[in-house]
């Protein structure tokens, strides 16, 4: 399992909750029940984008399928691992097949047929990934920032050398 330092961008619990519009109480409940959300110290409570997607899947299963989070404890490790072991490009074009009775999760291409062997939940990742991307790439007031009142100017070589001497 990947923790902070292994991935280029990591998110705090508050950022994870904001991205998924997850109430603080719900996050606390899930963190207590789902071992993969309990991070070792240090660093503590640091989540990758794969973790965010996995929590979005958990939210979908609890909200859309009315599954109690306690019933997901047996597949939580595999879910986090599946969302961190595959690239974002693969995941956004995939679906998860979750066999709760077998405690397994499989990643299938979005268009691929599923050879069901037991009752399973199927979660399309495209809408979840699109929502996460939309939130992460949202323009949060950058247009309100004023432009520089003067254009950038090119530096000559002698000015660059001179400025380096003054820094020492």
Image: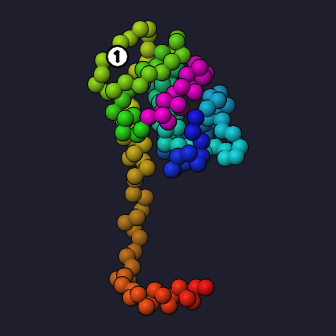
Vertical position of residue 140 compared to residue 81: above or below: below
Q: Is residue 81 visible?
A: yes
As drawn, which residue projects farthest toward the left? 111
**Quadrant including the N terminus:** top right
Q: Which residue is mark 1?
A: 114
- Identify the secondary structure beneath mark 1: loop
Q: Is residue 23 visible?
A: no
Is residue 82 highlighted in magenta?
yes
Q: Write the residue at 41% across / 70% down.
A: 145
Q: Write the residue at 52% across / 11% down.
A: 101
Is residue 161 highlighted in magenta?
no
Left/right placement of residue 134 relative to residue 6 reads: left
Q: Write the residue at 67% across / 31% down.
A: 32
Vertical position of residue 163 compared to residue 35: above or below: below
**Quadrant including the C terminus:** bottom right
Q: Write the residue at 39% across / 74% down.
A: 146
Residue stretch in magenta: 68-86
């Amino acid at each position: 399992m990947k923790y902070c330092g292994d991935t280029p961008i990591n998110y705090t619990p508050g950022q994870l909750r904001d991205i998924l519009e997850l109430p603080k109480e719900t996050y606390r409940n899930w963190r207590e029940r789902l071992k993969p959300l309990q991070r070792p110290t240090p660093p503590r409570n640091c989540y990758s984008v794969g973790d965010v997607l996995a929590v979005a899947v958990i939210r979908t299963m609890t909200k859309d399928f009315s599954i109690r989070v306690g019933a997901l404890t047996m597949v939580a490790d595999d879910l986090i691992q599946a969302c961190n072991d595959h690239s974002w490009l693969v995941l956004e074009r995939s679906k998860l097949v979750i066999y709760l009775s077998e405690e397994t999760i499989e990643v299938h291409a979005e268009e691929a047929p599923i050879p069901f062997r037991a009752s399973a939940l199927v979660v399309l990742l495209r809408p979840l990934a699109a929502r996460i991307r939309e939130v992460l790439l949202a323009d949060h007031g950058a247009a309100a920032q004023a432009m520089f009142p003067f254009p950038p100017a090119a530096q000559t070589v002698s000015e660059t050398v001179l400025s380096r001497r003054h820094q020492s």
